[in-house]
Amino acid sequence: QQERVKLVTDNLTGNVTEYRHNSDNSVRESMKKNAEGGLIEKVEFTQDVYKRDKAAKKTDFTTGLVSNYQYSKWGNLEKIETVNSEGQKVGESTFELADHHYERIVSEKDLPKGTETRFQYNQQGGLDRSETVNRDGVQIEANIFTRNPDGTDAVTKTINPLDNLVTDHLRNADGMLTESRTVNSKGTVIRSDKFAQGKNAREQVITTDLPLSGMQTTHTYDAVSGLLSESVTTNLEKDVEIEKSTYEQGYDGEATLALRSDLLMLLQTNFKHNADT
C-alpha cells in the first residue's frame, strides 16, 4: 500500500494541516487549522497529465479571499487569480518555469491599489529583488531579499525612490521579522517598527515610533481574524493620547481604516470604501 501524508504540524506556529485523499491515493483537499482548532485555509486539488497533485483552489477563511490556479497542459503553474468574498477580482500573479522545473513568480498585481510588482532572480535561482510600479508605470518601491533558514525568501531592505527613504528589516534566528528602521537621505532614523508573531503566524507590527516628532503608535489585533483592529497614537513627551483609529476587514480581506478620532480636538472621521479604494 502506498504511503501518504495525513497530518503536517508546524511546530513554530502550531498550525496543523490535514490531507484528505481519494480512493486512488491522490490528494482531494487539505484543511489547515490553527493551534486553537480554528479553520484557516482549505485547498482543493486536481491532477495534471503526470498524475501529480496540484492545488486548484485555495480559500483563506481569515480574509475571505479565494485563489484559483491555472496550469499549462504539462501541469506547470502559469497564473493565480484571486477574488474577494464578493467575487470581485483583487489580485493576479503570473509564474514561469525556472531551472530544474522550479515554478517561480514573475509578477503580482494588486488590482484595488493599481500596482504591479515584478520579481528578479539571481544566478542561483533565489529571489534577488522586486520592483513595484503604480498605474502610471512609476516605480514606487524596490525590495532586496535574502534567504531565511527554512529556505524561504525574506526582505532585508526596502527602497522608496520617490521620498528617498531606505528601510532595513531585522530578523531573528528563525527568520521572523522583529524590527524595521527607516532612514531619510541624511541617514536619520525617522521611523522604527517593532514586530511580533501574531495569529496564524502573521507578522504584526506592535509599536511604531517616530523619533523626530516623539510620537508612538501601539497596534491591537482581532483575536479571531488576526487583523489590525485598533491603533492609538501617544505623544511620549507629554504622555497624552492624541489619536485613535479603528479598522474593519476590507474588500481585499485585509484591515481597512474605518474610523479616526482626534482625541485633542474631539473630532471623528468615518471612512467608507468601495472595491477600488
Image: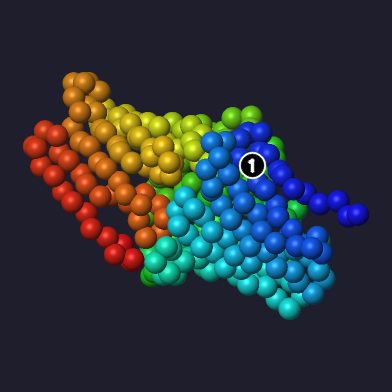
Q: Secondary structure at mark 1?
A: strand
The amino acid beneath tag 1 is: Val
- Residue 277, image x and y in percent? 31, 62
Q: Which residue is mark 1?
A: 16
Which residue is at the far right?
1
Towards the viewer: 36 or 10: 36
Towards the viewer: 19 or 199: 19
In percent of the image, x 91 and y 54: which residue is there?
1
Give the vertical position of 16 relative to 68 (above or below).
above
- Residue 61, image x and y in percent? 49, 53
The quarter holding residue 162 reads: bottom left
In percent of the image, x 33 and y 31: which residue is there?
218
- Residue 167, image x and y in percent? 46, 41
In percent of the image, x 23 and y 58: which residue is there?
272
Report crowding for label 1: few under 14, some 14 to 19, many 20 or more residues within 10 A (C-alpha). Answer: many
Towards the viewer: 173 or 47: 47
Give the vertical position of 243 relative to 2 (above or below).
above
